[in-house]
Amino acid sequence: MSTTNDKTVSKVENKASTNDLSKSTPSRQQRKMRPAADIYETKEGATIYIDLPGVAKDGLDINIDQNVLSVEGEINLDTPDNLKPTYMDIRANMFSRQFTLSSELDINKVDANLKNGVLVLSIPRSEQHKPRKIEVKAA
């Protein structure tokens, strides 16, 4: 389940892919997969979960430029030489996903963790955009 607030995090790229091997498609070197992502927003910030099975930490590149978060990299698709796949769910050896971040988020404090094929990006709200409780003083 994905939840998002257009004001905080919104998807930029929306590119569909096909899994039918009989259709003519670009070579595996040229294709990029668009991995699935879930976005959650809280009062503290936003958390993005991106499914990246077969991706190693070394094959991952995460950048933020002008409030656009880009996640790109390589997928290890090694198959034995004596096997020819009839069908493959993942045929691209590269992936790319982009998100536009709200100015309410502190892009200098992004935390990224890759574990068990899932990349978790935690992006806190900047202090000025976090909810605050105002203390009432007795006169």
Image (spheres, helix red, strand yellow):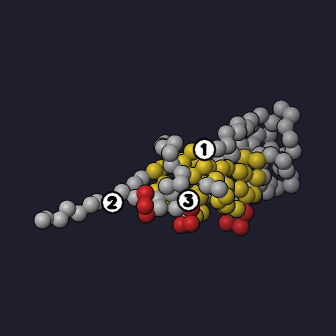
For badge 2, the amino acid type reads Arg
Closer to us: 139 or 52: 139
For badge 1, the amino acid type reads Lys
User: Residue 132's mark?
Assistant: 2
- The residues bearing labels 3 and 2 have C-alpha atoms spaced at a distance of 24 Å
Q: Nearer the viewer, mark 3 or mark 2?
A: 2
Helix, strand or loop for disc 1 = strand
Give the residue at x 86% y 34%.
24
Q: Picture quarter containing residue 55?
A: bottom right
What residue would you read off at disc 1? 11
Q: Picture quarter containing residue 86?
A: top right
Residue 77 appears in the figure:
yes
Helix, strand or loop for disc 2 = loop
What residue would you read off at disc 3? 121
Looking at the image, tell me whether mark 3 or mark 1 is earlier in sequence order: 1
Residue 39 appears in the figure:
no
Looking at the image, tell me whether mark 2 or mark 1 is earlier in sequence order: 1
